Structures are given as C-alpha cells and as structure tokens.
C-alpha cells in the first residue's frame, strides 16, 4: 500500500516537508479554494501538482495520487440526473484531474452536511484533544438550537431529557460554538457552511427525499460519470457517511456494507469504487470491517485508517488512538495488504492515517491546527500503522 497524507494546500500549517518527514510518499488533496460546483481547470490542477511534485527538486519526491474530494453540489443529491449543469461541471473537474495523471478521486454523497462532530477538543485522560460525537449534544442542537420540525418525534422521553440537560448546561458561547462546529463545515468539508436559518432552508429543500430517492440520485450520477472515469482510468471512491446513520431526518445511504453492495450491483463499472474509512464504518457494530475488505477488496482504491470508540450509549463516540478503537485494525490492515499484494504496481491501494489527536507541541495555543489534521497526532498514527504493516507483511511471508 502507498502511504498517503492529507494536505490542505499552501495554507496548511502542516508543510510538505512535514509530510516528507512523516515518511508518507503520496499526497491527498483538492483545490479547496474552488467554490463547490465550479469546474476545475487542468491548468489549476497542474499548478498544484507542480507545487507538490516539482517545486522542491532536491527534496524527497512526493506524488499527488488522490483527489479528496471533488464536492458534489447539493442539486445532484436532490435532483439526480436532472442536475445537468452540476454533473457536467463535475465531469469537467474529473477530466482535468485525469489529464494530470491522477487516478483516484474521493467523494461523498451526504446531504446538507459532510462529516459531523459535536466536540473538536475533547480532552483525553492524557491531556491530548480528540474529536468526538456526543449524541446528547447533537440532540440538544437539533431540538433546541436548530429546532428542526419533526425532531421531537425522533427521540424518546429519556433521550429528550438528556438533551435538555446538555442544552441547559451550555452558556451562550457554548451554544454558538456548537452551532459553529456542526453547521459551519469542518475543514475539507464538501458542503457549504451554514447559519441556523440557512440550515433550516436546506432541510426544507430536501423534503420528500428518502433513502431510495437519494440512492436513485447517486446511481443516476454514477451512470453519468463512471463511463468517463472508466475511459480515463480513474477510480471514483465513495466515502462512507460520517457518522454512518441518518442525521437531521435526512437519509444517508453509504453507511453499511449492504449500502455499498447495492451500489456496486446497480453500477458495476470498475470505476465505481470505495474509500474504505475505518473510522466512519467502524462506528456501527453491525459492520464487520475485515469481512468488508474481503468482500469489496477490488473496489477499494483508497483507505482512511483511524479508530473510533463507541460510548456505552452506542451512539456517541470519540476518535481513539489508531490501534485502540472498536475496529480490529490489525485484521483490517492484514486484509487490505492481502488485496494489495494481488495488484500490479500502478494499482496499489493508497491509505492515509486519518484524524490524529491534538497533542504535544500542537497543543500550544499559538499553534494553528485543522481539527483532526494535526501533524503530530497523524504522525503517531502513521508510525503505528506502518509498524503493523511491516509486522503483518513479515509474518504473512514466513
Ligand atoms: C473528514 C473527511 C471528509 C471526507 C469527505 C470525502 O475528515 O473524511 O471531509 O474528506 O467526506 O468526500
């Protein structure tokens, strides 16, 4: 497998030399400054590629091998194949990327908000900070801040009482922070930042879109884009829903092994691939991750390796050390390596260590960090994963 590292571009406080020193060979990035829905040009992709691959010729070579993500505009999710202009723009971006020789594109199909957390700086017993999704704080947000019509019916009395207690414990600043964390789009998000009013408006626009409709829209999108991708030798990798269950009454359709099985059946093109995100999929106890790697192996072009740990309520979770969450990381890595060994050189799986803790020097208040994307936390994750990989490879060989 190839060791990747997500880099947010020239403004990322983590530099390309940091990436080199972490030992990664592959860069995962996007044209984050281009507005959602605007077609990328080949010249802009080539310029970013030059910055990554050529600008420092005496340094260790880096390769931009994965685009994460080309965002899918909202109207594609709401209207499917009828969102013609957005799909055409997406295809133009895909072509620009392919012309620069980049062969893996990540995307997701989560309506209204991309990945969601309620806490970005949840303190661990060792003083490091982790990302967390707290079900009661999430419920407090949708019941008492967003005031989503219909939310009341989504909770039983005990859950509502816990949400109220969480809400009452918040100061006004805490409330504003929770709104910011949930609604204003985390770094790398593929959805627009929202105010509470904008959020409500988006939800109204999704009225009547249930899971079968949303799935049909994804299939319609894939039927348009996969023939182009296939011809250009590009694999499109669908990132799972994070967290992998419906939020805000909106459907989510890439949460479970069966969701992916249905999509691969509906669109068998080999360009229809998967981003295997262990942290997202692993939040559901009914996803057997090593088994999913064995089942979907040839579809996996890209992997996000991180570990989430569920709280006793079964719905809250935090991001644990990379080897110490609920997922059996060693078994997943072993299955991925087995798949990877069966592939020719140019088709190796790219993985990246996902979401590290904020720790050590990155805790300094003066240090600007992107939530989950600190240098040191990910460096630790990558080092641990690399150790597992070496050990598994050695043992599997003997
Ligand atoms: C968060 C990421 C997401 C992911 C997109 C993929 O850390 O996993 O932003 O990049 O959902 O399209």
Image (cartoon, rainbow, N blue to C red):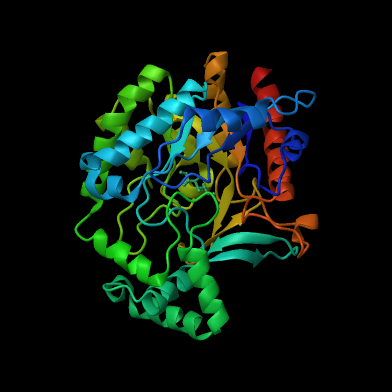
Instruction: Tell me: residue 42, above or below residue 178.
Output: above
Instruction: Tell me: residue 238, above or below residue 297.
Output: below
Q: Is residue 214 left or right of residue 66?
A: left
Q: Quadrant of the C terminus?
A: top right
Q: Residue at x 32, y 73 (%)?
A: 148
Give the percent coordinates (x, y) of residue 142.
Answer: 39, 72
Is any atom of residue 27 visible in this view?
yes
Give the percent coordinates (x, y) of residue 94.
Answer: 41, 30
Q: Residue at x 66, y 43 (%)?
A: 10
365, 211: nearer the viewer: 365
Give the percent coordinates (x, y) of residue 134.
Answer: 51, 67
Instruction: Tell me: residue 63, above or below residue 77.
Output: above
312, 98: nearer the viewer: 98
302, 47: nearer the viewer: 47
Instruction: Tell me: residue 190, above or below residue 297.
Output: below
Q: Quadrant of residue 305?
A: top right
Query: How many callouts does the rendering have?
Result: 0
Q: Residue at x 66, y 32 (%)?
A: 51
Q: Quadrant of the N terminus?
A: top right
Q: Is residue 239 left or right of residue 384?
A: left
Q: Is residue 389 left or right of residue 313?
A: right
9, 109: nearer the viewer: 9
Q: What residue occupies the far top of the structure in this picture?
A: 344
Give the percent coordinates (x, y) of residue 180.
Answer: 51, 68
Is any atom of residue 270 visible in this view?
no
């Amino acid at each position: 497998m190839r060791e990747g590292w997500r880099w947010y571009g020239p403004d990322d406080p983590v530099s390309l030399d940091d990436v080199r020193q972490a030992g990664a060979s592959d860069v995962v990035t996007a044209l984050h400054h281009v507005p959602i829905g605007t077609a990328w040009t080949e010249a802009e992709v080539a310029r970013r590629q030059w910055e990554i691959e050529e600008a420092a010729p005496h340094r260790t070579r880096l390769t931009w091998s994965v685009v994460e993500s080309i965002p899918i505009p909202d109207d594609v999710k709401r209207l499917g194949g009828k969102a013609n202009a957005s799909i055409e723009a997406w295809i133009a971006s895909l072509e620009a990327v392919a012309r620069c020789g980049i062969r893996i594109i990540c995307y997701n199909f989560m309506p209204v908000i991309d990945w969601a957390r309620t806490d970005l700086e949840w303190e661990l017993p060792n003083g490091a900070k982790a990302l967390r999704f707290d079900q009661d704080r999430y419920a407090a947000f949708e019941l008492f801040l967003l005031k989503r019509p219909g939310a009341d019916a989504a909770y039983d009395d005990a859950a509502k009482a816990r949400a109220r207690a969480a809400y009452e414990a918040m100061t006004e600043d805490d409330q504003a922070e929770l709104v910011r964390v949930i609604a204003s789009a985390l770094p790398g998000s593929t959805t627009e930042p929202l105010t509470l009013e904008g959020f409500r408006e988006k939800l109204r626009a999704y009225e009547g879109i249930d899971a079968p409709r949303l799935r049909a829209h994804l299939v319609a999108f894939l039927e348009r884009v996969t023939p182009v991708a296939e011809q250009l030798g590009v694999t499109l990798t669908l990132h799972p829903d994070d967290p992998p269950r419906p939020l805000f009454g909106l459907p989510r359709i890439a949460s479970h092994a069966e969701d992916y099985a249905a999509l691969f059946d509906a669109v068998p093109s080999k360009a229809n691939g998967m981003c295997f995100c262990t942290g997202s999929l692993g939040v559901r106890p009914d996803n057997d991750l090593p088994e999913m790697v064995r089942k979907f192996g040839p579809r996996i072009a890209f992997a996000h390796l991180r570990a989430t740990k569920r709280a006793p309520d079964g719905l809250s979770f935090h991001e644990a050390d990379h080897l110490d969450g609920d997922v059996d990381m060693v078994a997943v890595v072993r299955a991925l390596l087995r798949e990877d060994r069966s592939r020719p050189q140019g088709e190796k799986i790219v993985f990246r260590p996902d979401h590290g803790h904020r720790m050590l020097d990155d805790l300094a208040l003066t240090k600007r960090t992107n939530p989950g994307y600190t240098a040191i936390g990910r460096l630790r994750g990558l080092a641990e994963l690399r150790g597992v990989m070496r050990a598994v490879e050695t043992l599997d060989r003997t």
